Amino acid sequence: MVINRALKIRIYPNKEQEQFILKNLGCCRFIYNQMLAEHKFVYEQLKNDKLTLYKYKYKTEKEYKQEFEWLKDADAVALQQSRMDLSIAYQNFFKRLKKKVNSTQLGFPKFHKRGVKDSYRSINNGGIFIDFNLKKVKLPKISWIKFRDPRIIDDINIKSATISKTKTGKYFVSLLYEKEIFPKQINLTKPNLKTKGLDMSLANLFVDEQGSSPEYKRLFRTYEPKLSKLQQVVSRRQLGSNRRKKAQLRVNKVYEKITNTRKDFNSKLSRHLVNNNDVIVVEDLNLQAMAQSLKLGKSVNDLGYGQFRFMLKYKAQEAGKVFIEANKWFASSKTCHVCGFIKKDLALSERDWVCSSCGEHHHRDTNAAINLADYGLKEIGQGMPKFTLVDIKALASEAIVNNADDVELGGRNENIDLHII
């Protein structure tokens, strides 16, 4: 199986190369903003004439080069990619518009600002190479740039390169390449598969079916007092002054430290879980909605659970392991893993509860993790029904009360996802 992977390395350009990278960043940002401004202006002029608006031909980067000759010094392929980025941004906007999502989530294309996600992309047309022995990478119109990274990839087939500059003044290049993998598929019919159910926890990142959690640290909360002091210093500096830039750089370095530490922790933890388990089951959570609706935005974002889940997914794919995301309507916390009873009135603040059907005492997160592990086994065909038909009917009744879909019982056309048992 052939997959796309990215190798991100830090580069160390000389002054001349740095000036060209900055010029490229500025030209790509200029093209994107000019084209976006043209789109908005044309729409305001022709929004009442849909046919003319549909047939209107917008300027290309070649036409902008004729108007602004200094754009000819930039990488032509990078300018084309900026136009494609704007096109993709519009396509994503219209897709969300058709789904009739909340107006705050429509994501209409915005103008790019200097210093905010500064990057440009160039397709490999024979001008991008990397030499792992000399520790140099060749980029279009820049020639060879030094880098430091111990990783070595044999027979790397580079498709594109994305050059970026961080807020702390560091330069990186991300090389997209094709990788052929031969994962050893596990035997799903063998007994005693190592199954791991992970229930997200704001305090501990996750809790598994054994009640264990990683040694997770709330990084943003840890550095928050230091950030507060540094940001107060920034606010007292004059706008545009060098002292303000230096103060802002100190703030950016702390944020970078938090980001890198969190990424390193998630990467090592996800690798450990993939190497030591056959089936990994997590919840399909809308983390953005949780951060907005539950007033837990700072805690949810500090958790980095989305990044952790993404790493688990692609590492499990490469290793030939099974990664399952449980249905978002699966009541993992409210369902008793012993008898299947659903406590529909379980509040978020209740960390422990007792099943009124069988009397079993549950820790909320551990019980949810056990249910997730059982969900995974049933998805691969190894789960056995735990409950009698009467119990299933009772469970279906609870689902109806909880505004579930129609259920088919007693010959009536009613549907219920029996994964919840």
Image (tube, rainbow, N blue to C red):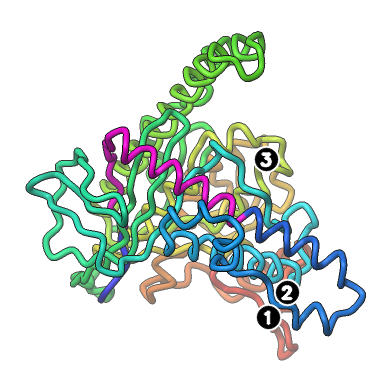
Counting the numbered discs, the total is: 3
Residue denoted by label 1:
415
Say left or right for 14 vs 36.
left
Query: Would you place residue 288 above or below residue 167 in this image?
Result: below
Circle 3: residue type: Leu
Name the main secondary structure of what is drawn in magenta.
Answer: helix
Residue ID at (68%, 80%): 415
Q: Quadrant of the N terminus?
A: bottom left
Q: Earlier in the sequence, mark 1 or mark 3?
A: 3
Residues shaded magenta: 6-32
Say left or right for 178 vs 53.
left
Kindly state the secondary structure of the residue where label 2 is placed.
Answer: loop
| Magenta-drawn stretch contains 116 | no
On residue 142, which mark appears? none
Residue ID at (27%, 74%): 2
Residue ID at (28%, 38%): 13
On residue 348, which mark appears? 3
Front-lying residue, 185 or 228: 228
Give the spatial CA distance, label 1 vs label 3. 28 Å
Q: Residue furthest toward the bottom?
A: 411
Circle 1: residue type: Asn
Residue denoted by label 2:
405
Give yes or no for contact between labels 1 and 2 (Cβ–Cβ under 8 Å).
yes
